[in-house]
Amino acid sequence: MSVRVRYAPSPTGLQHIGGVRTALFNYLFARSSGGSFILRIEDTDQQRFSEEALKDLYETLDWFGIRCDEGPDVGGACGPYIQSHRFDIYQEYARKLLDSGHAYRCWCTAERLTAVREKQEQEKSSYKGYDRHCRDLTAAQQEEMKRENPNPVVRLKIPLDGSTSFSDMLMGEITRKNSDINPDPVLMKSDGYPTYHLANVVDDHLMEITHILRAQEWIPSGPLHVLLYRAFGWDPPVYCHLPMVMGKDGQKLSKRHGSTAVREFREQGYLSEAMINYISLLGWSFDDKREFFTLQELEELFSLDKINKAPGVFDYKKLEWFNGQYIRMKDARQLKEMLIPYLVHDQVVDNPPSPQQLEILDQAMPLIQERLHLLNDVSEMTRFLFCDIPAPPADQLIPKKHDASSTAEILSSSLKLLEPLDDDSVDRLEQEFREFCTREGIKLGAVLMPLRVAVTGSTISPPLFESMKLLGKEKTLSRIEAAIDQLRQKEQECDE
Ligand code: GLU
Ligand code: ZN
């Protein structure tokens, strides 16, 4: 029997790390076992459905290169793959359960259900939930109820005693007393819409799903689903509930920790390769050592027995590190193309960039590629090469243990040392500066810091001497001169 797995998102919000991890593990399991990966849209909750979320789902899977073998866009033998297009099927299967006596119609009005709940609360009753009022009504009683509410819901009969178990590949045997299962859950709402439980189980069966890999938060639904499979006379698939994804503080990953929506990571300039690699390690490992995997490698190497029981910890810094590594590995020309939209967006270059700007970018690529963590850092890192920068205020130029006057001296001496900038090698210039510092008894940092701020307008930049060389002698020297002016002015103000 060949493996068939599915990702079954409800498009109610943007795709987040947890969801994508589920998608990825299902996809990788299908690929590594020669099976099929199915995408199914669970959009039965029309109130929470969002068109935007659906679009985001397709974009995200596309960006990651996770392609489905069957799904809304590619079709397949078990379609349609969008639950809102399958309502007739759910009607049919709800009727089967009614006919076999595993389900029943409930005509209770919302008012009645509220009254029941309030009474339970007042009496501090240990029994909570629907009181099974309609479970064993006589025909006459049913007629009477129908008059009050012509649109019944369909409920599943949960056995009154005993317990239900299912076995999870990771968690082992999970057993729940039937009396602890929410009494008689609704399968079909009064408007004819199925609930998640019915649609999910019917579809997993009809789509011949062999393994269910999904988040651990669905474990509580497990026993109920198993009861549904039995009511239909079907065998449940194999369950493997995936380890939680947590923040470093041990709490479930949430917006409190930082971005969780894939779209936000994408906009900040994370590469899909880096994210795939990192997400694959959230609850799975190949061995204790290897960290780097391409999607193709994962498609071969992934296996369920290497899924960890322990939660996966989402470490933003580590992801950023991965991203930097993948940026280094990228083909420079490809990387350049990816950077241009960020530079255009931040108005560092024209739209489209001029030939001169493209040439500057070409020359800067080796420096940028070595240093970027995120693509959207590029603007800050290179703005000084493309744009005029205002002379920095004196206070930003003065290193520790120096004042305006000594900083101005340092920059003036630097001007002389930089005379051969265009003709000399960067290594030699650096050497000259080192020697200068030794001679004068100044720390190298106290020279480089004001120079860097003067030339690039920032305390962080690509390597300084290379940056100056890229910028060209004329601009470099005039920026240093402007900085000296600032310092001299400050000096005067202090003297007055
Ligand atoms: N539609 C459910 C979700 O949004 C699917 C859960 C499952 O995989 O059964 O996660
Ligand atoms: Zn009822």
Image (cartoon, rainbow, N blue to C red):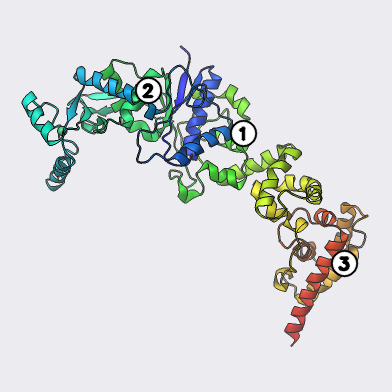
Q: Nearer the viewer, residue 158 or 312?
A: 158
Q: Is residue 170 above or below residue 438?
A: above
The residue depicted at 93 percent of the width and 55 percent of the height is 423
Q: Nearer the viewer, residue 276 or 310?
A: 276
Q: Identify the residue under disc 3.
A: 415
Q: Identify residue type, mark 1.
A: Glu
Name the spot of residue 268 as percent of width and height, x first. 60, 47
Left or right: 268 in relation to 80: right
Tell me the distance, in whole angstroms, between the alpha carbons under discs 3 and 1.
Answer: 47 Å
Of the image marks 2 and 1, the number of the one nearer the N terminus = 2
Label tally: 3
Q: CA distance from mark 2 to mark 1?
A: 36 Å
Which residue sits at x=32%, y=16%? Answer: 234
Q: Which mark is residue 203?
A: 2
Residue that lies at the very extreme toward the top in this rendered image: 1
Sequence-wise, which precedes: disc 3 or disc 1?
Answer: 1
Q: Residue at x 71, y 57 (%)?
A: 460
Residue denoted by label 1: 291
* Amino acid type, label 2: Asp
Give the foreground label among 3 and 1. 3
The residue type indicated by label 3 comes to Leu
Q: Is mark 3 within 8 Å of ligand 1?
A: no
Check disc 2 and report its element: helix, strand or loop. Answer: helix
Location of residue 31 in the rendering, given as x and y in whole percent from the top left corner: 55, 21
